[in-house]
Amino acid sequence: MPLASQKGSGTFTGTEGTVTYTQPNVAGDGLLAVAYCETTSSTAPVLSISDSAGNTYLPLTSASVLSSSGAHDLLEGWYVASCLGGTNAVTVQVTNISSPVLFILAALEYAAAFAKLDASAEGASANGSNIKLSLQVSAANELVLIAGSLESINGSLSVDSSTPGFMIEAGGEFISGYPPVTVPAMVVDDRLSSGAGTQAAQMDFQNPDGGSCMIAAALAFATPLGTQGQPQPLPPPLSIAWQKGRLNLAGIPGFFDVTDGCMQGGQPCADDLLLKLSHNAKFAAVRSKLIYMGFYADGNTVPTPVDPDDGYTYSREECQFVYNLFSNRSPAPGFVPGQAGPPAQSNSQPGTLYNWPGAFDVNDATGLVSCRGSYWQNGQEIPSNDGILKVYAVCTRLSLNSSN
């Protein structure tokens, strides 16, 4: 585990296992735990996890298999987004099987908090055959964690060095990460993603004869790995640089669901928490907007707005459109949809206005503009698509409008 700041592991027989970190956890670090449970029961095991520090563990993913020996095996992972500081012991228990089982437990600490679980995958084989998983990773420098397990039946199997027992794909090439291991075994490895896209991993065994499981997960860091607990320059405060009546931010702020417990008395105020609060303050300042979109006519499409304050591009789901009726006539030649200034008007009126405004609309789901009206000429109603609208977008980030 080259990326973990500290790790602990152990093998246990019974219905629970405990691993103690050798050093106190640093407040605000991210924690991971992976457990392999090999049973002699046909009942699928159920695991629970806790630690002496009182952290809240969230699930990564799990894989289970009824192996060729007729027993259930389980491989499961958990994470703590931002841990409490101090000494800590991690305990995993089987809650539904009374007979002794074999545990292998690994506990890992990373010098950065986790912002979110980005992706996960899992797989299993009843006879220990090869497993390959793929993760759709959203960005570079996410933690890609892979864990695999192989059941002991004969107790003498090992991974052949010429056929790596564990490989992770980086930059399109598989990198072998493990020497031969003797079963029963749980292997755990990590990498930083090189960018957005598919991250693949596979586990190969030589002449296996037991059940095998594999899990994979990608977690985004809240701050760069290795910076937690070190003095870091905070992002610039809200830049009140009023230019043309706009609030100019250096970057697009995100939103973090900071729990109230992080800000109770006696809790350390780490740099990670300050960064999240700074992002949330900026996010609140720009979340709701009324953005001018320009002038449009029938058949035009209003694009998704771009926030002038920080360059954020809104999705259709985050917008609803409102408009003012500017003219009952079509725009004159030279009109550009979305132009900021009022367009010249054509001489397109064939008669007296009859049904106007008729049905004017900007579709919130697509941005399509429609103008429907009519004129009265020579005793007849003449349908028309004449009309010019002055359009505004009502935007709320991370929302969902009624049309979507």
Image (cartoon, rainbow, N blue to C red):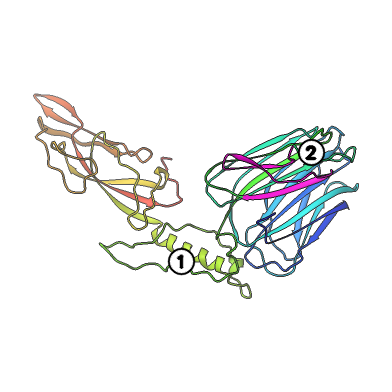
Residue 235: give its label. Answer: 1
3D distance between C-alphas at marks 2 and 1: 50 Å
Q: Amino acid at mark 1?
A: Pro
Q: Which residue is mark 2?
A: 160
Residue 208: x and y in percent read 82, 34
From the viewer's side, name the closer residue of 96 and 91.
91
Q: Which residues are magenta?
A: 163-191
**Nearer to the camera, 266 or 87:** 87
Instruction: Reply above or below: 273 against 211.
Output: below
Q: Earlier in the sequence, mark 2 or mark 1?
A: 2
Q: Quadrant location of residue 211?
A: top right
Amino acid marked by disc 2: Asp
268 above or below 41?
below
Residue 170 is covered by the magenta coloring: yes
Give me the residue at 12% from left, 29% from top.
Answer: 376
- Kindly state the secondary structure of the residue where label 2 is placed: loop
